[in-house]
Amino acid sequence: MIIFKFNSVKVQINTNLARIQHLHLGKEQKVTINVLRLDLIHPIISGNKWYKLRFYLEEAINASFKEIATFGGAYSNHIVATACACNERNMRSVAFIRGEMTFPLTHTLQEAVSYGMQLCFLSRNDYKNKTDIIASNDLPYRYWIPEGGYGILGAQGAASILNTVPLQEYTHIIAAVGSGTMIAGLLNGSMAHQTVIGISSQKNNLSLESEILKLTFTENHRKLILMHDYHFGGFAKHPSELLHFMGDFWYNESIPTDLVYTSKLFFAVSDQLQKKYFNTGDKILVIHSGGLQGNKSLPEKSLPF
């Protein structure tokens, strides 16, 4: 358990809840698949969000910054997690949001506002140049966290995810990929005999590998495999096939997934098993990165959980 103090306020992130859950998948091929349930450690700052934020927040607090500023889209788990983390630490927060303001706000942005976050909307063209945004909006008391927690500190936090498991047992580590921060951290924290596989949630993001490798140690580059065929049409796209898989996966494994990242992750794992990608005796650790709030954008009763 991590207890973080700020202005005499204690915040608990119960990392002990990040339990290992065994999947029924892979039995016929004698492949072991375990899931690290990071979605259980906190109701809002769940999964990899806490790990990617932790060292940024620590640095900001130690340097006496009073406000956190960051970036994200209208459905960003990072935005909600940052807003909640700042609220619990009695810090102000502001987010620069990609795209024009729409009414009503998305469920994600409504939740961020409920935690006291100020939203600043930018056109998609203006949003591209974050250096200019920071230069135009920098303040002495404002600490900037990159979109998705991307950066050395975010990867450092993500690497510590692997401290919670008996790491040496696994041959493969698999996770969903957005900004690439978590998979970079997993690469840095993995062992020499392990292969790290990233399932990209974006369509045709050809720069993804180079963005990941900017945050990794040179000797780890050879262990990375990125799979780009499980985006289901693009970022946050969720055709009926994917929603049906999410429902079936819940009934079979009792694990909730989100429509942006983890549903596509587990679909990829299932599909690669059917294609006999893994070998007999392989032991696979799948990282459930949390962030289920995106499902609130779906019509009621679209999912059984």
Image (cartoon, grey):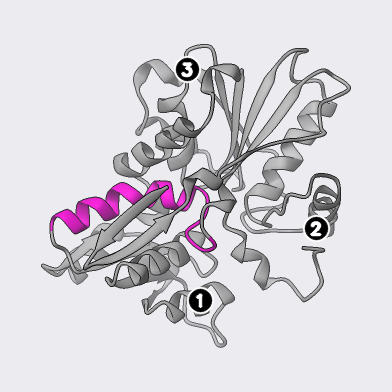
Residue drawn 49% across the image and 35% down it: 183
Viewer-proximal residue among 71 and 41: 41
Q: Which kind of residue does numbered mark 3 sit on?
A: Met
Q: Are marks 2 and 1 in contact (CB under 8 Å)?
A: no
User: Of 155 and 232, which appears nearest the observer?
Assistant: 155
Q: Which residue is mark 3?
A: 191
First reached walking from the N terminus: tag 2 or tag 3: 3
> Split into 4 quadrants, where in the image is the C terminus?
bottom right
> With 133 as the anchor, is 140 left or right in this view?
left
Q: State whether the magenta stretch is mostly helix, strand or loop.
A: helix
Q: Residues within 10 Å of mark 3 (few under 14, many from 20)?
A: some
For the residue carrying disc 2, how many other residues have a C-alpha within 10 Å: few (<14), some (14-19), or many (20+)? some
Magenta stretch bounds: 43-63
Q: Position of residue 37 (x, y in %)?
A: 61, 44
Query: Residue at label 1?
Result: 111
Q: Quadrant of residue 267?
A: top right
User: How far is disc 1 from disc 3 in space, using C-alphas?
Assistant: 38 Å
Residue 298 sits in quarter = bottom right
The one of 2 and 220 positioned closer to us in this rendering: 2
Q: Position of residue 7 (x, y in %)?
A: 21, 68
Judge whether 287 appears above or below 255 on screen.
above
Q: Secondary structure at mark 2?
A: helix
Q: Is residue 207 visible?
A: no
Mark closer to the observer (2, 3): 3
Observer able to see residue 195: yes
Q: Which residue is mark 2?
A: 243
Secondary structure of residue under mark 3 = loop
Q: Is residue 114 above or below residue 173?
A: below
Amino acid type at mark 2: Leu
